[in-house]
Amino acid sequence: MGTRRVLITGCSSGIGLAVAARLAKDELRRFKVVATMRDLNKRGPLERAAGDSLNKTLEIKELDACSEESIRECVNSLPDRRVDILVNNAGVGMIGPLECQSISDMKELFDTNFFGLARLVKELLPDMKRRQSGHIVVMSSVMGIQGLLFNDVYSASKFAVEGFCESLAVQAMKFNIKMTLVEPGPVVTEFERKVYEDADKMDLSGADEETVKIFREVYIPYSKKIFASLGQTPEEVAEASETLQVITAKEPPLRHQTNRLYMPLTALKHADPTGRLPLDTFYKMTFNHDRLFNASLGVLRLLQRKSKKL
């Protein structure tokens, strides 16, 4: 198989940047990377990460996933409009009490996280069908498998992404097109920092006192502890054992979780079809067993350090 063109969205920072740089520096030079972002003024970090691969195996283009015109213009600029692998990574986050979030903000989040994916696939799928080849890789989340406290809208967008891809995958198989949902757990990025910053500025006057207290005094501290204990770096998600392996696999999986230490939490959902087990477990971890929660994270933190040394 010759060089494959990879179109990646959301490459100004985080996972998108790390994946683009990793593929561009592939020792076997299997990829021609088209790294895209909405604002080209933010290309500096990617250029530095790309190093010598810039304008050789990696080129940077403008693409706004919320605009069909922008997507079409970017794809039309490519030779024969050929995209062998789409890595849909662009996304935004949102946390907080539901009653403090506007419907317009929810729609804006869905416009990027879900409809951005739908626009890209709608543009590229006909070409992939004609060529009878292609691979659509979607950066989803473990929150597309299991909902999490105060992540109602973000999780809903990822559930939508999961349902969209799982449904489309059946049709895609008929045309020899692969689909893969990459599901990171906590990832320490600018994305996470911005979500917490927005939470600090959030107007919580629409919520009752107890809900605000749970958000401020329980959820935020617990969430930060989870990121500190289980969080991966974007480079860890992008490295050979993760996203690169999925992209180069002859028979890639439909789903791939990147964080082994988080898998026991997502496994709870499949262990009990009634849904009671994960609900009760998360409730007790959040409200009843602070010492157990901290002890468990301590063990997981130790395992994380050991795995990094291996």
Image (cartoon, rainbow, N blue to C red):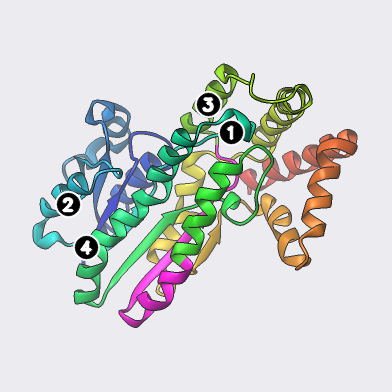
| Residue 240 vs residue 156, the one in the foreground | 156
Res 219 seen here:
yes
What is the quadrant of the N terminus in the image?
bottom left
Question: What's the residue type where badge 3 is placed?
Answer: Arg
Question: What's the residue type where badge 4 is placed?
Answer: Thr
Q: Which numbered mark, 4 or 1, is in the foreground of this view?
A: 1
Q: Position of residue 69 (x, y in %)?
A: 17, 47
Task: Judge from the rendering whether residue 119 lies leftward or rightward of residue 261; answer left or right.
Answer: left
How packed is label 1: few (under 14 Cα within 10 Å), some, or many (20 or more)?
many
Q: Earlier in the sequence, mark 3 or mark 2?
A: 2
Q: Secondary structure at mark 4?
A: loop
Residue segment shown in magenta: 166-187
Q: Earlier in the sequence, mark 4 or mark 2?
A: 4
Quadrant in the picture for residue 291: top right
Q: Secondary structure at mark 3?
A: helix
Q: Which numbered mark, 3 or 2, is in the foreground of this view?
A: 2
Q: Are marks 3 and 2 in contact (CB under 8 Å)?
A: no
Q: CA distance from mark 4 to mark 2?
A: 23 Å
Quadrant in the picture for residue 260: bottom right
Q: Which mark is residue 193?
A: 3
Q: Which residue is labeled 4 in the image?
A: 3
Q: Secondary structure at mark 1?
A: loop
Q: CA distance from mark 3 to mark 1?
A: 12 Å
How packed is label 2: few (under 14 Cα within 10 Å), some, or many (20 or more)?
some
Question: What's the residue type where badge 1 is placed?
Answer: Ile
Looking at the image, residue 241 lies above or below residue 221: below
Q: Which residue is labeled 2 in the image?
A: 72
Question: Residue farthest to the bottom?
Answer: 174
Q: Earlier in the sequence, mark 3 or mark 4?
A: 4
